[in-house]
Amino acid sequence: MKGLTLAELQQLPATVDLLTAARALGLGRTKAYELAKRGEFPCRIIRVGVAYLVPTAELLRLLGVEPSTREGR
C-alpha cells in the first residue's frame, strides 16, 4: 500500500476507516485487521457493526502531527 502524505493526512475527515489508518502507519491490510481484532491496533479504534473507524485526531498525534494544524480548523 502507498503511504499518505502530510497534506493528505491533514485533509482527512473526523474518522477514517481502518485501511486508511493502516496506510498512514505503514501496515498492511492483514496486519491491520489482525491487530484490530486483538485490540492491539496502535491507536484507538471504534467498531461500528463490522467496520472499524479510527479517530483522525488520535492517528495524527500518533504520527507526530498536531490535529490543530489541519487546514480549515
Image: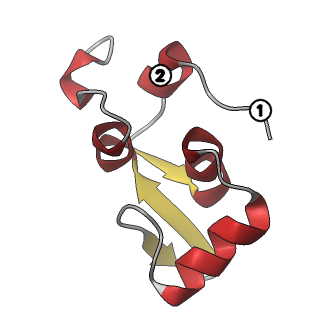
Q: CA distance from mark 1 to mark 2?
A: 17 Å
Tell me which corner region of the image, top left, top right, bottom left or bottom right, holds residue 31.
Answer: bottom right
Residue identified by numbered label 1: 2
- Is 73 placed above or below 42 here? above
Residue placed at 30% from the left, 32% from the top?
A: 64
**Residue at figure coordinates x 44%, y 57% from the top left:** 54
Left of 43 or right of it: where is 17? right
Disc 2 secondary structure class: loop
Residue 43's image quarter? bottom left
Whether tag 1 and tag 2 are in contact, CB under 8 A, the answer is no
Label 2 belongs to which residue? 11
* x, y percent for residue 37: 58, 85
Q: Relative to the observer, which residue lies in front, 15 or 5?
A: 5
The tag earlier along the polypeptide, 1 or 2, is 1
Q: Label 1 amino acid? A: Lys
Disc 1 crowd, CA 10 A, few/some/many (<14, 14-19, 20+)? few
Which residue is at the far bottom? 38
> Residue sitting at 74 percent across and 56 percent down?
28
Q: Kindly identify the residue that appears in the image at 61 percent across and 52 percent down.
A: 22
Residue 36, percent across and down?
55, 76
- Can you tell which of label 1 and label 2 is closer to the viewer? 1
Q: How many residues crowd mark 2 within 10 Å: few (<14), some (14–19), many (20+)?
A: few
Q: Give 57 or 51, whichever is nearer the viewer.
A: 57
- Relative height, residue 12 to residue 32 (above, below): above
User: The residue tagged with tag 1: helix, strand or loop?
Assistant: loop
Image quadrant in which the C terminus is located? top left
52 left or right of 42 in image: right
